[in-house]
Amino acid sequence: MGPGRSLLALPQGFNWFLILVAAVISILVLAGCVYLLIEYQHPEDRNQAWFPKIIVIFSMSLAIWTVLMFPLDVANTQACNLSISPSACTYTLPMHQLWYAVFIANLVLVFLIIPFTLFFYEADSDYTFCQKVKGSLMWTAGFLVFIILIIVIMYLLIGYVVYPTQQLTSGVRDMGILGSLNATNTSCILPLTSSKSNASLVPDFQCSAFSSTFKASNWKIRVSLPVYIMAIQSVLGWLLFLVFAGVGLLAAPIDWLQEFLGRPRAMITKSEYMRRAQIIAQRAKQIANMLQMLRRADRDRRYRSNLQKLTREVALLEEDEYQLERVFPQGEDGEVKWVLFMLGFYVLGFMAFAGFCLTLAWVAHMIAYMLPPTPLHPFLNEMFIALDGVFPLFGVGAFAMFCLYLVTVAMKGNFLMGLNFLVIKLYPMRPGATMMSSFLVNTALVLVMSPAIVQFCAQAFAVYANGTSIFDVFGNQVMYLIGIKYIYNFNIFLYGMLAFMVLAGVFLGFRGKKVWKRRNPLEAYAMID
């Protein structure tokens, strides 16, 4: 299983250093999700909506933990000493039980808790608490019954795995018949009481296993319900993952690079800050006047269009205010805020460089290992094994980095698609101006994608991750499910992801550098009588 097995492993196979690393990384992921919430939340949601915030932080952490559990599964498999057989080893963590718990928690959050929280958060403010709870429970129950019916019906009808097998007919036969058969098509296992010399001379000796032909057949068995639910989660996640990750693989490093190159060179003066703040105040007054005109106007076919344009102008105004506060920090620690603000851009510059390298490596790995019917080269699998040979857990660390990068670009693609693409309209994510409803919807999307990311990594790193608990699910069961196996066998999702990546590159090439234009908001609307 690799040289990493000997790292701080007790004779029984326990690796306490692995448990410590897993605990530290879990805490760091939780802290990162709290920072993301603080950075993106709308000022109106500060110091309130605590229950949705707890759900968002836990759900987003669970999505990242789900993906990072795959490297943990690899490290857990390597926890036993090489001298201990896998069947006799007591592994550090019960990964089968942990995987089932994580996927069940994912399912409950996506289809029960997050919908209830979203319905409760967006309920009419005039409703009482009991009315909000009642309405949210009714909507959630209807949604949940619909999902359960689909999963149960599909499980009862096509919840089977079909394995291709070769049938070997065996039985006890006289060894004298061997002379009349073709030796190349015949197999015979001698009984332990016979010897080769006597077997060739005495025809009374018999074969304990005998076959003259091999017959191909299929072995069909029903898969367990938890595994089938995991497979359905993976397919649903793939429908989002191939779009968002396909866009994010190229768009994320390009966007980070543009942010770095377009960074402010110096803090603006107080007079410049006052001038820009006055412009923002004038635009806010114009938008308020426009809103009054909309309230007095008849609700005809132009009303909805004008309301959408007004909403976009409010979003741009909030973004300008957010950026103005960043280039002229307020308070006694303004200089410290400015230094941290500039350090953030250099972090983005490093992320852009690393992102281009990781995207190139992922594309090369898909072309060399995943897309051809017979892999051309193990590529990243071989690199991880070599890194483990240098120092235990180096390969696991690199493996975790590639998996985590997929989560990052999928989230980045989700944010970009929600803001810039008109084909799919999602709740927008904007720094400093994101309502909790947008957080809940986008967090649910990330949670749905996390099983697909795990399945993608299991397929991509089948050599390195062989023997892990999750590979037994995705590599040995999901890939043979009726109705689903053809999607994976023909790499439909992979080709879709690469297609979206090419489309994103073409779009970004034509769009060029982002230029924000500001104009009079009244010019954006149709004439209102």
Image (cartoon, rainbow, N blue to C red):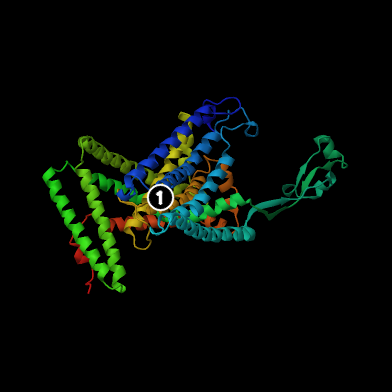
**Front position in the image: 459 or 226:** 226
Do we see residue 15 in this rendering? Answer: yes
Q: Position of residue 20 (x, y in %)?
A: 48, 30
- Name the foreground residue: 134 vs 89: 134
Q: Dividing the picture into quarters, in which one does residue 29 lie?
A: top left
| Picture mark count | 1
Residue drawn 38% across the image and 43% down it = 358
Q: Position of residue 265 (x, y in %)?
A: 18, 42
The front one of 26 and 88 is: 26
The quarter of the picture where the C terminus appears is bottom left
In the image, residue 269 sits, relative to residue 302, either above or below, namely above
Query: Where does the image place residue 239, in percent across and percent down from the top left?
Result: 46, 57
Which secondary structure, mark 1? helix
Q: Is residue 378 visible?
A: no
* Figure check: 476 above or below 302: above
- Say what amino acid the circle numbered 1 marks: Ala
Q: Is residue 429 above or below residue 77?
A: below
Q: Residue at x 50, y 37 (%)?
A: 72
Residue lying at the far left of the rendered structure? 271
Q: Residues within 10 Å of mark 1 (few under 14, many from 20)?
A: many
- Screen quadrant of the N terminus: top right
Q: Is residue 262 left or right of residue 117?
A: left
Task: Give the quarter of the image for residue 482.
Answer: bottom right
| Residue 84 image position (x, y, % from top left) | 62, 29
The residue tagged 1 is 410
